[in-house]
Amino acid sequence: NAGVTQTPKFRILKIGQSMTLQCTQDMNHNYMYWYRQDPGMGLKLIYYSVGAGITDKGEVPNGYNVSRSTTEDFPLRLELAAPSQTSVYFCASSYLRSRYSNQPQHFGDGTRLSIL
Amino acid sequence: AQKITQTQPGMFVQEKEAVTLDCTYDTSDQSYGLFWYKQPSSGEMIFLIYQGSYDEQNATEGRYSLNFQKARKSANLVISASQLGDSAMYFCAMSGVDYKLSFGAGTTVTVRA
């Protein structure tokens, strides 16, 4: 059972570099999400997608971009890395809307990203 | 906008005792869902329990139960018979009409032998 798979697990970037965090799920979930978690804090929503070709901003979208060309994949791109983007990034997926059912969001193991 | 408040940054509990983690929320949505997640030191997010706003009975999942008081807008998590493996950060979260999850700041639980 792969579930939600995130790569890489760790990465160090220099200021101004760009990179893509990969996320794929094999549960045929239509909803996918990207969160960031700063030290000692809860998760904040960056972007989300309700299906292939449909994405929307969350609470903290600045500095990030996403795309959803397939049901399985939801990559997150950082264009110009800044120290403020040092965080742990989580991808999650769910079936239908969380509030309508007891289907929770399933999380990947996270990507620990440091910008130096 | 939704807001989740967890007022207990850290708690200690003796092994085999019960512990209650507080969670209050603020929303204007009539229909919403409440979730609790566990994050051990290894970092993954583990779903524990769910309560729908229209559910009349409190949710239970094994040693986890949710004390849902809708009028007070609280959704406290009760862990019974604590085990050493319960030591972790616990997050309360809710989703409303926009189906986005909003998380609280979390409570760290340390179980003592």
Image (cartoon, rainbow, N blue to C red):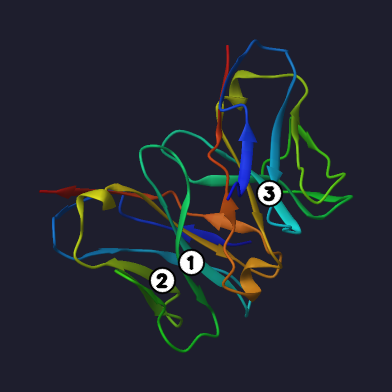
* A67 shown above or below B50: above
Compute the Cα span from label 3 to label 2: 24 Å
What residue sits right under mark 1 in the picture?
Answer: B25
Q: Give the mark toward the camera: 1 or 3.
A: 3
| Mark 3 or 2, closer to the camera | 3
**What amino acid type is highlighted by mark number 2?**
Ala
Q: Residue at x 76, y 48 (%)?
A: A72
Instruction: Check disc 3 and report the residue beneath it.
Output: A33
| Label 1: few (<14), some (14–19) or many (≥20) C-alpha neighbours in 10 Å | many
Given the current orientation, which residue lies at the most extreme bottom position? B56
Q: Which residue is mark 2?
A: B75
Q: Residue at x 57, y 63 (%)?
A: A104
Marks 2 and 1, the one that precedes in the sequence = 1
Give the image quarter of residue A89: top right
Amino acid type of the residue tagged 1 in the rendering: Tyr
Look at 44% across and 49% down and name the residue there.
B105
Q: Chain of mark 1?
A: B
Residue B67 picture location, percent across and down = 35, 76
Q: Amino acid at mark 3?
A: Tyr
Q: Are marks 2 and 1 in contact (CB under 8 Å)?
A: yes
**Which quadrant: the N terminus of chain B?**
bottom right
Q: Between residues B71 and B82, which one lies in front from this camera angle?
A: B82
Q: Secondary structure at mark 1?
A: strand
Q: Tag 2, which chain?
A: B
Q: Mark 2 to mark 1: distance in Å?
A: 8 Å
Check if mark 1 and mark 3 are on a common chain.
no
Position of B50 relative to B90 (above/below): below
Residue located 74% across and 57% down the image? A28
Label 1 vs label 3: CA separation?
Answer: 22 Å
Can you tell which of label 2 and label 1 is closer to the viewer? Answer: 2
Which is nearer the eye, B59 or B4? B59
Q: Chain of mark 3?
A: A
